[in-house]
Amino acid sequence: MSRSGAAAEKADSRQRPQMKVNEYKENQNIAYVSLRPVQTTVLIKTAKVYLAPFSLSNYQLDQLMCPKSLLEKNSNNEVACKKTKIKKTCRRIIPPKKKTTSKSESMLQNSASAVHTESNKLQSKRTADAMNLSVDVESSQDGDSDEDITPGLDDFSGLSPYERKRLKNISENADFFASLQLSESAARLREIIEKRQPPKSKRKKPKRENGVGCRRSMRLLKVDPSGVSLPATPTPPTLVADETPLLPPGPLEMTSENQEDNERFKGFLHTWAGMNKPSSKNTEKGLSSIKSYRANLNGMVISEDTVYKVTTGPIFSMALHPSETRTLVAVGAKFGQVGLCDLTQQPKEDGVYVFHPHSQPVSCLYFSPANPAHILSLSYDGTLRCGDFSRAIFEEVYRNERSSFSSFDFLSEDASTLIVGHWDGNMSLVDRRTPGTSYEKLTSSSMGKIRTVHVHPVHKQYFITAGLRDTHIYDARQLKSRRSQPLISLTEHTKSIASAYFSPLTGNRVVTTCADCNLSATLFNLTSFKKYIVFLTRHNTFTGRWLTRFQAMWDPKQEDCVIVGSMAHPRRVEIFHETGKRVHSFGGECLVSVCSINAMHPTRYILAGGNSSGKIHVFMNEKSC
């Protein structure tokens, strides 16, 4: 028995010195590793097992317990050896400062694995012997040496020492929690919380004095300060969507919206029907000098008698009748109106007549070059009509409900064929001599949008279009059904172009108006297809949302001068030479608004400008007034 105890003690002593402390792993690829010294203290719990041989034939059941002398002897030996074991186990471990090679490290790992294998064999052998022996376990924690009272085999028969210790801890923990009386404390705290909960506060109603409650707004009570009840507010009218239905197809009767006197209206129609002969004066004479031209412009003035209110909406287009005897002005408005004004009629209110041949803005307006008694108007609603004053009707020339029109011009001197531009970039060739209101050819251009169309004054087969960023010149004889390519492209501007027009006499110049605040005049040759920029001058063309966009126009009498509106103060209409120099500025006390659309008489010194409120301002020679 003493030999077995000594053998177990010797096995424990072999395992302890070879236990690894602060074990680390190094990279096998690194040859030398520098280790810093670490000072640590290791406390090791030890457990001693005493083995006593016995034989079932020599002992009876009540003698299975270990004798007291053996227990006392073992306990005395343990107390005597405890101090020496603590000294051995509690030691300082200071790693060496020398560099450790991979070879030495592998030797240490091999020795550690051999010790671990040997200890496993001893442990398995001890476990097998303990099945036939009585066991007494004694543990020490943190230097304390409390003994556990080992119960008899009747209480824990067939249980290992670990299970006995576990059952003992469970019973002790149960007794400890029962002594705390947590359930009773929780019940008492719950009763205290319920008692301390404040009652719900209820809002006290104000006391009524003389049957009158709290003060309320008289506006909410719909009562005036004197106490009289107000009348019920009328219900607001229901808003109806702004719809502009198309007018019925076919000819429309020419009826005035602002004049009701039939006799006066008949006289008006007779006056306009008499203007059916074009001017016999040759307009293709040579250019006058700038000095004489400026002198004639200085003689043009404006007065209150030459300011007329024609339409209710903004003016989008304007045309001057080429008559030499009477001053007749036609305007197209935003809401589909066409207004005619006779400046020689007195009083001036009797000389204004307004018609409604369209349902959307009238963006282009021309008098027929073959018969000035006819006026052609084009609208966004996809209709092109001709007003015949001799028959007092608006005849429908072209209709396309699937598209919206932007501009048109005449391809022939007799005004029989027309070129029509669409907002979606398409172009239509229309022949008035064929029956019906359809087109002869519909072609798509290389532009995404067309704003204006203008035909060359000499070579009628060429026409120019203004689009989003560039200006194209096409040949009407080479138009294709898809993606017609232009002859010349003008790309001097960087923003949206509002208009592009040929010069009125030779057509060698093109003036463009753009949103980049630049006016451009380009000189080009149609035979060689070469272009030269004549001038590019700065001019404020930013009109904003509520004003009609500027459109620079050539003076029909002086093709090297351009007429355009201005945003400057005081309000004015300016004329520029092709070199970019300002020739003249029209202004006066009667001009207090921006004239976005302007037109000059082809033979006389008469200028008419239209604003965004439906008024026209006419500058003319004092003798003509």
Image (cartoon, rainbow, N blue to C red):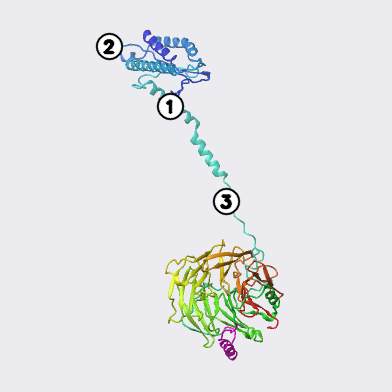
Identify the residue under disc 1: 171
Tell whether position 267 is magenta: yes
Give residue 298's position: percent from left, percent from top: 71, 76
Q: Residue at x 56, y 86 (%)?
A: 277
Q: Give the magenta range.
A: 257-281
Residue 171 sits above or below residue 485 on the image = above
Characterize the local packing of mark 1: few (<14), some (14-19) or many (20 or more) Cα atoms within 10 angstroms.
Answer: few
Kind of residue sitting beneath label 2: Ser
Kind of residue sitting beneath label 3: Lys
Tell whether position 345 is magenta: no
Q: Earlier in the sequence, mark 2 or mark 3?
A: 2
Res. 295 image quadrant: bottom right
Q: CA distance from mark 1 to mark 2?
A: 37 Å
- Which of the image's four quarters has the N terminus? top left
Q: Are marks 1 and 2 in contact (CB under 8 Å)?
A: no
Asked which secondary structure carries label 1, the reply is helix
Characterize the local packing of mark 2: few (<14), some (14-19) or many (20 or more) Cα atoms within 10 angstroms.
Answer: few
Q: Residue 269 or 196: which is nearer the viewer?
A: 269
Identify the residue under disc 3: 200
Q: Earlier in the sequence, mark 3 or mark 1?
A: 1
Q: Earlier in the sequence, mark 1 or mark 2?
A: 2
Q: CA distance from mark 2 to mark 3?
A: 84 Å
Residue sitting farthest toward the right: 589
Q: Residue 550 or 603: which is nearer the viewer?
A: 603
Could you say which disc has been placed on residue 424 in the image?
none
Q: Residue at x 65, y 61 (%)?
A: 207
